[in-house]
Image (spheres, rainbow, N blue to C red):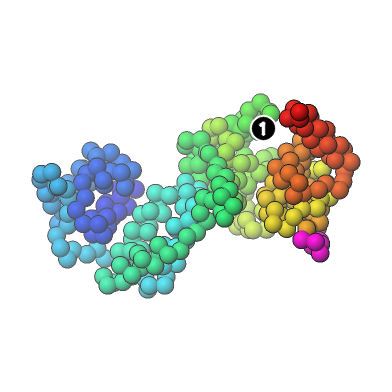
Amino acid sequence: MRADRLVSLVLLLRQRGRMTADQLATELEVSVRTVLRDIEALSTAGVPVYADRGRHGGFSLLPGFRTELTGLNHHEALALLTAGSGRGEKAFGLSSALASAMRKVVDALPEGHRATLDDAAKRFLVEPETDLLSRRAGTEQVATGVMDEVRHAVLAGHKLRFEYGAPDKTPRWHTVDPLGLVTVRDRTYLLATKSGEDRTYRLSRMLFAEKLSEPAERPAQVDLDRIWADRSARFLSEDHIPVLVRVKSTRREELLNTTRSVRAEHPEPDGWVRLEVTFEDLRHAIWAIWQLDTAVEVLSPDELRTALRQRALAVAARYGP
């Protein structure tokens, strides 16, 4: 870990020039004292780092100093920088590692290409926080330390113990054999087995997690694509409430963002779309449909139509003359 940090420190000074200890500490996510120790270690190892005193002082490298890192061509580096510029940079708790890797990518380019690469990367935006309808993308909050413990257990092949709090249920402790991690729409899931049975857990519902010393019971090879597809198919086949609706095509995406699954879709000539969708339960369906006001019409089931009519009457009574 320290060796990676020392390389990152050198690359920061190469690419940005003079930086203060505070700036370096912020970039490297360590204390100022750690930065000063690292600077001393680099100097002892022969890296030409020198300090400028005074108001505008800081640390710098002697001009022309270059680390020996593997080079990349312009398009390879641009692809990596673009991929790392989106909101997925926080996936699996690896944002610091990604930032370090991106510094190495930039440093690996020929001197004359760095400015053009930096400008090119700024012209691509991957997964912004809001879409054209100004809807903010949902972000998942994972308890401190949980992501690291889960990731370490997955990579080391050890059993994982955690406290899990599902909605409307008392938190419970689980010990599982982790298979892998999957991130979908900014939600991260742990695929695991428990006593030989398939299990899927959302990391945002884990209150505490710890990697155990006991090896996990799992196959040597894993096909996460296949496992995720199988578990998704089983989840969608569960007993959720099916709903037949008509929705304006301009509001289709809003509806789909709230459903559990889409079983069929039929465009209609009047600018509407007929959809067969599923919701978790009646309460979920009422909430989702109500968001779209008159841009959606429920055709079935009757219990959902009745519930929406009753809610509309109650609202009209509240705001009527």
Task: Confirm whether residue 280 shows in the render.
Answer: no
Q: Residue furthest left?
A: 53
Looking at the rendering, in which quadrant would you find the C terminus? top right
Q: Residue at x 33, y 70 (%)?
A: 116
Q: Position of residue 63 (x, y in %)?
A: 15, 63
Q: Is residue 270 magenta?
A: yes
Q: Residue furthest right?
A: 302
Q: Residue at x 27, y 55 (%)?
A: 12
Judged from the image, the secondary structure of the residue bearing numbered disc 1 is: loop
Q: Position of residue 196 (x, y in %)?
A: 70, 43
Q: Position of residue 218 (x, y in %)?
A: 62, 49
Per the rendered image, the range of residues in magenta is 265-271
Question: Callout 1: few (<14), some (14-19), or many (20+) C-alpha neighbours within 10 Å?
Answer: few
What residue sits right under mark 1 in the picture?
167
Using residue 198 as the reference point, say whether residue 29 is left or right of it: left
Q: Residue at x 17, y 50 (%)?
A: 59
Which amino acid lies under the numbered mark 1 shown in the image of this protein? Pro
**Quadrant housing residue 265:** bottom right
Q: Residue at x 21, y 50 (%)?
A: 19
Q: Residue furthest front?
A: 321
Q: How many marks?
A: 1
Using residue 169 as the reference point, say whether residue 135 is left or right of it: left
- Give the camera-side residue of 289 and 88: 289
